[in-house]
Image: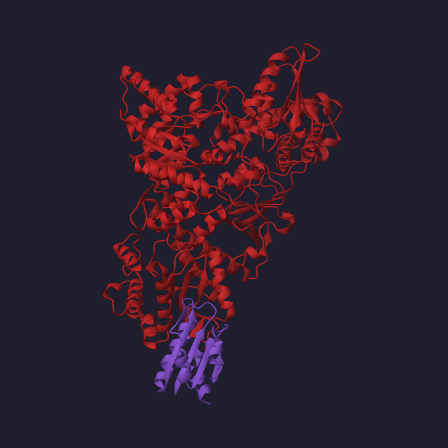
């Protein structure tokens, strides 16, 4: 499946990127296509476009803080989890989207 | 001044002493009065109290505070001479007998405790930190200095015998003080002992004692009564400083009491035989001096006084001391192991092992920091982009000079020679001065020594100069302005300076120059001194550089003309700022108006530095502005050749300079002079990322292997200490708190035995990665519930955008999700190898396409301070 995701933690120094890495790695190993936007200390990176989102079958918002521009995901199936969960159990998080 | 009777004279004065008329100035005044037969009375017109000018104690009891208006009345045969001399002394010398106002110290509190102590669940007491340091030992509880006469008082012998007993006691105690004076060379200790000698000879005290014996009291009873009488008077003073002098009276009377009492009726003196912390309600200075310094590890006082003589001594002797612990003597039992933390104002009784451990680890961290600083202090200060800044020292004596060079001074930027001229009745001779200057030049070992000729005037009057009284001495005849009337004194000094120049690199500098004429006149005087020496056949440096202080604004606008005549300049910011802002620097209430970071003042400094730079003249800065580390970016931005500061600040200034970018500092200064307020400049200083030269995120100094930390608390503290030792944080406690604030959101243990604590904080002065490998894994609240054996700290500055470093941090965070990368890190057992491994992998990940990025994130070759790797790395960062 095609997945889009956003990761964002409180300080934006470490967990945002660790969660992004886990989701990317795991999705690929499961044969999914994924694009992860990070909202960290460097601001928004790898930003999801309207097209990215409209083509995706689901979105994962792995965040401890308010997601910037959350309205983008209104028309799409969305799973919200704390950042830690994406780090600890990325497989389980992706499974939630499929379930 | 004259009144009806020819033998009665009087005058009125306003007290110019900031601490009021306390024991030491009063003892000088009593010395003067005691030279005359006339009766001398002091009356405080504010409170109506009156006292004998020949008695220190009586004068103190008159409770004269700063600016109180007082009347002196002199009556007797020699009243005219006495009145004239007292008046001269009070107007000219008394103001110089004062000392700086005591710093207001704040009582320690639980919030101020570092986490390591808070979590130890300590039982501790808070007091006022008076003399810094940490000490531990067994509690020695002193009885109070309260005076009780015991049996002797009740059955007096004949008044004649009691009088003899009293006189013997006075002589014995006075001899003891005199012999300590003879043996003691320390200025602080001598001043205090002299004050005690003065109290023993005090006319008021003697009169009180004699009167009581005449009334049939025993000698012991008389001592107790007189002691309590004066202690009571002093205790009523409105000045805390004077109230604290009560202790001195009590101590002296306690000593007298011991002498007049039956042997055995007074407790024997306490001898220390091991590390000890002395606990007392009040402590006399002689009591303190009587303890074996080897064993005296700390002092805890019940009284809150921070300026008592004992506390002044504790500071000068470096004995940790905490005051203001109510009921101190009842809080501890004799023999209790006590720890005194006089940095935080804290006393820990029956100190538990956890607290010992905390302080031992803190001591080790402090030693590591000192070791790093000493590496910087012994090398020249060079900014990261190669600009050299001499860091000199301000000194007042040859001893100061030796101390300064031991601290790494590149020279003496300001030798305040006037201290050789103070507190004496004639100016020092040429040979006397030469001996001092030669010692300083010898200690310099070829480094430059700037001798500033005597800078006295209304604020530092000298009795033998007979300077006219001025309503506004700071705007009066001081510095170079008073030389014309005292040419011989100046030329004697110049000859001594010139002769010292034969032994090394000496420069001579004139104070308070405001016009070209003064500069020319001063030069001419140097030329005359030279020809006097030539006639004598004495040797000197014929090309001795002649310079001037820039401390009067008018001089700052004729630099072209001055430069044609003079060789160098030093900006004296203390006076320059007070003349520039029209603010008396002694007036604490106006301090805000004369902030040296006021953009207007910075613009003046910039104009001076720029112009002298264009003229190719050497320019330095002495004055307090130069000694404050946070001003350093502004001073580097000015492009000064030198700054001169108090010796103890030199190592930290050199280290700080090494991490600055001169180019960034110039930009900062250019922005600062366009600000509107000092507050805006402060914000710029805090927020500017450019002034700091980029440092490697990681070097071997930030890696700890085989850490013995026992828990998460200790592990984090150990990493913070490593950053502190490396000069990457100025405030370790705040950094520690920032890391824990992040842990409070949720623990940063990732699982796999790894934790990644991190923070973004303005307590961080350079972005850093710390690595800690633990001997024994510790609990961290990890995602997988397992303990942690490797910790990677990411510490980020809270200033400005720093894209590259953040990119490195985020890349590292991603790489840590890779099992094989973690395994490689876990397996490496060498600090340097660990640094290069992380560096190589990070560089490859951050900029795989660019070969030039190799070594970009780290400094592989360990901890070299000015290594070429760092320079290369710095370039890549730009």
- Estimate the x, y position of residue B81 in percent, counting from the top left: 60, 13
> Could one spot residue B367 in this view of the protein?
yes
Nearer-the-camera pick, B348 or B875 = B875
Picture quadrant of residue B430: top left
Number of marks: 0
Q: Residue furthest bottom?
A: A99
Q: Residue at x 38, y 40 (%)?
A: B606
| In this picture, residue B629 sits left or right of residue B616 | right
Q: Residue at x 34, y 63 (%)?
A: B804
| In this picture, residue B217 sits left or right of residue B124 | right
Picture quadrant of residue A18: bottom left
- Estimate the x, y position of residue B79 in percent, counting from the top left: 64, 13
Chain in purple on the image: A
Quadrant containing the N terminus of chain B in the rendered view: top right
Indicate whether B661 appears above or below B553: below
Nearer-the-camera pick, B292 or B303 = B303
Indicate whether B282 appears above or below B60: below
| In this picture, residue B696 sits left or right of residue B228 | left
> Could one spot residue B459 in this view of the protein?
no
Q: Residue furthest left?
A: B851
| In this picture, residue B243 sits left or right of residue B113 | right
- Estimate the x, y position of residue B434 in percent, counting from the top left: 35, 24
Q: What shade has chain B been given? A: red
- Estimate the x, y position of residue B2 in percent, counting from the top left: 66, 13
């Amino acid at each position: 499946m095609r997945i889009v995701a956003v990761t964002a933690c409180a300080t934006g120094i470490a967990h945002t990127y660790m969660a992004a890495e886990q989701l990317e790695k795991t999705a690929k190993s499961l044969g999914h296509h994924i694009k992860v936007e990070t909202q960290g200390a460097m601001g928004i990176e790898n930003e999801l476009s309207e097209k990215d989102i409209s083509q995706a079958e689901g979105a994962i918002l792995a965040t401890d803080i308010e997601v910037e521009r959350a309205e983008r995901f209104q028309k799409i199936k969305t799973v919200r989890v704390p950042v830690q969960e994406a780090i600890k159990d990325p497989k389980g998080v992706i499974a939630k989207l499929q379930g | 001044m004259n009144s009806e009777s020819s033998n009665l004279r009087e005058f009125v004065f306003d007290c110019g002493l900031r601490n009021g008329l306390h024991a030491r100035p009063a003892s000088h005044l009593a010395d003067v009065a005691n030279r005359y037969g006339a009766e001398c009375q002091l009356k405080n017109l504010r409170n109506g109290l009156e006292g004998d000018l020949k008695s220190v104690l009586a004068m103190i009891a008159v409770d004269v505070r700063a600016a109180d208006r007082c009347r002196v009345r002199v009556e007797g045969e020699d009243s005219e001479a006495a009145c004239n001399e007292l008046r001269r002394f009070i107007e000219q010398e008394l103001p110089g007998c004062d000392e700086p106002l005591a710093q207001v110290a704040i009582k320690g509190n639980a919030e101020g405790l570092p986490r390591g102590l808070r979590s130890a669940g300590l039982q501790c007491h808070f007091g006022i930190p008076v003399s810094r340091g940490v000490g531990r030992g067994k509690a020695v509880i002193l009885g109070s200095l309260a005076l009780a006469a015991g049996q002797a008082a009740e059955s007096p012998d004949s008044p004649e015998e009691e009088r003899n007993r009293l006189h013997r006691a006075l002589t014995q105690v006075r001899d003891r003080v005199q012999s300590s004076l003879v043996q003691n060379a320390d200025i602080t200790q001598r001043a205090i002992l002299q004050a005690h000698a003065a109290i023993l000879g005090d006319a008021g005290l003697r009169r009180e004692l004699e009167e009581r014996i005449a009334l049939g009291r025993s000698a012991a009873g008389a001592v107790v009564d007189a002691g309590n009488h004066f202690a009571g008077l002093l205790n009523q003073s409105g000045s805390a400083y004077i109230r604290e002098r009560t202790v001195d009276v009590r101590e002296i009377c306690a000593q007298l009491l011991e002498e007049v009492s039956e042997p055995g009726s007074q407790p024997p003196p306490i001898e220390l035989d091991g590390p000890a912390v002395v606990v007392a309600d009040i402590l006399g200075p002689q009591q303190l001096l009587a303890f074996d310094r080897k064993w005296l590890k700390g002092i805890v006082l019940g009284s809150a006084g921070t300026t008592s003589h004992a506390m002044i001594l504790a500071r000068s002797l470096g004995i940790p001391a905490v005051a203001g612990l109510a009921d101190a003597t009842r809080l501890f039992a004799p023999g209790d192991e006590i720890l005194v933390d006089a940095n935080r104002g804290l006393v820990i009784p029956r100190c538990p092992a956890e607290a010992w451990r905390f302080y031992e680890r803190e001591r080790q961290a402090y030693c590591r920091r000192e070791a790093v600083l000493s590496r910087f202090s012994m090398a020249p200060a060079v900014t990261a982009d190669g600009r050299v800044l001499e860091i000199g020292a301000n000194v007042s004596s040859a001893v100061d000079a030796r101390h300064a060079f031991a601290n790494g001074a590149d020279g003496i930027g300001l030798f305040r020679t006037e201290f050789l001229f103070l507190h004496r009745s004639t100016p020092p001779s040429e040979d006397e001065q030469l001996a001092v200057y030669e010692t300083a030049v010898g200690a310099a070992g070829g480094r430059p020594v700037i001798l500033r000729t005597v800078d006295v005037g209304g604020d530092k009057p000298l009795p033998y100069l007979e300077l006219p009284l001025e309503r506004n001495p700071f705007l009066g005849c001081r510095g170079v302005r008073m030389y014309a009337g005292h040419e011989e004194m100046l030329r004697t000094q110049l000859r001594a300076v010139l002769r010292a120049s034969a032994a090394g690199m000496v420069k001579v500098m004139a104070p308070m120059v405001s016009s070209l004429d003064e500069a020319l006149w001063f030069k001419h005087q140097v030329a005359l001194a030279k020809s006097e020496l030539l006639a004598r056949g004495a040797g000197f440096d014929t090309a001795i550089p002649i310079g001037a202080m820039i401390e009067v604004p008018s001089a700052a606008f004729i630099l072209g003309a001055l430069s044609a005549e003079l060789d160098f300049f030093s900006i004296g910011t203390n006076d320059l700022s007070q003349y520039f802002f029209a603010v008396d620097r002694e007036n604490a209430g106006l301090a805000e108006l004369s902030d040296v970071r006021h953009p207007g003042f910075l613009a003046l400094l910039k104009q001076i530095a720029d112009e002298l730079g264009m003229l190719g003249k050497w320019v330095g800065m002495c004055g307090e502005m130069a000694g404050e580390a946070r001003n350093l970016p502004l001073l580097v931005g000015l492009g000064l050749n030198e700054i001169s500061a108090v010796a103890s600040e030199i190592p930290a200034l050199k280290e700080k300079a090494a991490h600055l970018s001169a180019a960034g500092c110039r930009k900062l200064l250019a922005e600062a002079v366009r600000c509107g307020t000092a507050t805006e400049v402060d914000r710029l200083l805090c927020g500017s990322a450019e002034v700091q030269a980029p440092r490697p995120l990681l070097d071997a100094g930030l890696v700890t292997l085989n850490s013995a930390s026992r828990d998460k608390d200790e592990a984090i503290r150990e990493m913070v200490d490593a950053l502190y030792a490396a000069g990457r944080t100025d405030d370790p406690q705040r950094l520690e708190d920032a890391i824990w604030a992040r842990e409070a959101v949720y623990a940063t243990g990732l699982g796999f035995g790894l934790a990644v604590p991190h923070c973004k904080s303005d307590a961080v002065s350079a972005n850093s990665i710390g690595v800690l490998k633990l001997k024994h894994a510790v609990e961290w609240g990890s995602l997988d519930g397992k303990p942690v054996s490797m910790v990677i700290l990411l510490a980020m500055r809270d200033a400005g955008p720093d894209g590259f470093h953040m990119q490195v941090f985020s890349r590292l965070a991603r790489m840590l999700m890779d099992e094989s990368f973690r395994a490689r890190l876990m397996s490496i057992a060498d600090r340097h190898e660990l640094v290069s491994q992380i560096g190589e992998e990070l560089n490859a990940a951050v900029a795989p396409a660019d070969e030039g990025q190799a070594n970009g994130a780290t400094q592989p070759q360990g901890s070299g301070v000015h290594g070429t790797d760092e320079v290369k790395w710095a370039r890549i960062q730009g």
